[in-house]
Image (tube, grey):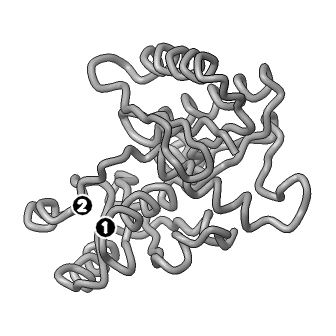
Amino acid sequence: MIQLALETTGTNGSLAVLDGKTVLWDCRFGVLRRTAADIACQLDTSLRRCEDRGLALDAISVAVGPGSFTGLRIAITTAKTLAYALGLPVIPVGSLAAIAAVNLREGSAANVLVGLNAYRRQVFAAEFSRDELCRDNLIHRCNDRAEVVSRQHWDERVADKCGRSDWAIAGDRSIVSDQVAESLHHAEHCDAVGVGWVATGLVAGSTSQPPACYADPFSLTARYLKLSAAEEKAALR
């Protein structure tokens, strides 16, 4: 399966093209200019490279959250538009599962604790094991495991896992101490590669045709897991 994988979970984003679990190329964007402006250029370059190599896309995978409210919408809207234009299925992937996949495949730990800053003293968190997330036929429930926890709860989980050889900690450096931040695994590949790896596993693990993980582009929505600050204020009125 040739797929284009996208993620704009945070302030930056990434893109990858994979053949199964083989990474053909990947890139990060949104560093020197805004992600919304940069994604179109990187997408155009990737599609041209596919055309030059005679590669026809079979699917588009995209990180659907949790993550930045604005950031998620960029990749999701791009994936929906492109999938509709090319008549391709979309595979939604949990953001934390994608981050975990990169860290587990490139690191040596048996388990990984992933956290993203949810702000207002909260963290998006989830735990994954190598056995479940790196298998060829991914268990579908691994794809949507993230939860919102308090910063205190997150700190307690980090303290419990920190220093253990069977655990790695991945995600935002802003939600861990400087000492823990130094030990965070710096992944060679970008998070979009993790999106593609998870999507490949979901397709392989499906027993239906078309695969159950395929989503209609128009049904694709972000998994925010929490209200925005504006929504919370409105709810209190």
In the rendered image, which quarter is residue 78 located in? top right
Above or below: residue 138 compared with residue 79: below
Residue 58: numbered disc: none
Answer with mark 2 or mark 1, whichever residue precedes in sequence: 1
Residue 212 x, y percent position in the rendering: 83, 58
Q: Three-letter amino acid code at disc 2?
A: His
Which part of the image, by quadrant, shows the N terminus? top right
Residue topped by disc 1? 107
Which of these two is toward me, 143 or 202? 202
Residue 99 x, y percent position in the rendering: 43, 56
Q: Residues within 10 Å of mark 2 (few under 14, many from 20)?
A: some
Residue 37 x, y percent position in the rendering: 45, 14
Residue topped by disc 2? 185
| Residue at figure coordinates x 53%, y 22% from the top left | 46
Q: Say whether residue 58 is left or right of residue 135.
A: right
Q: Which of marks 2 and 1 is in front?
A: 1
Above or below: residue 68 compared with residue 87: below
| Residue at figure coordinates x 49%, y 55% from the top left | 98
- Between the C-alphas of marks 2 and 1, the distance is 7 Å
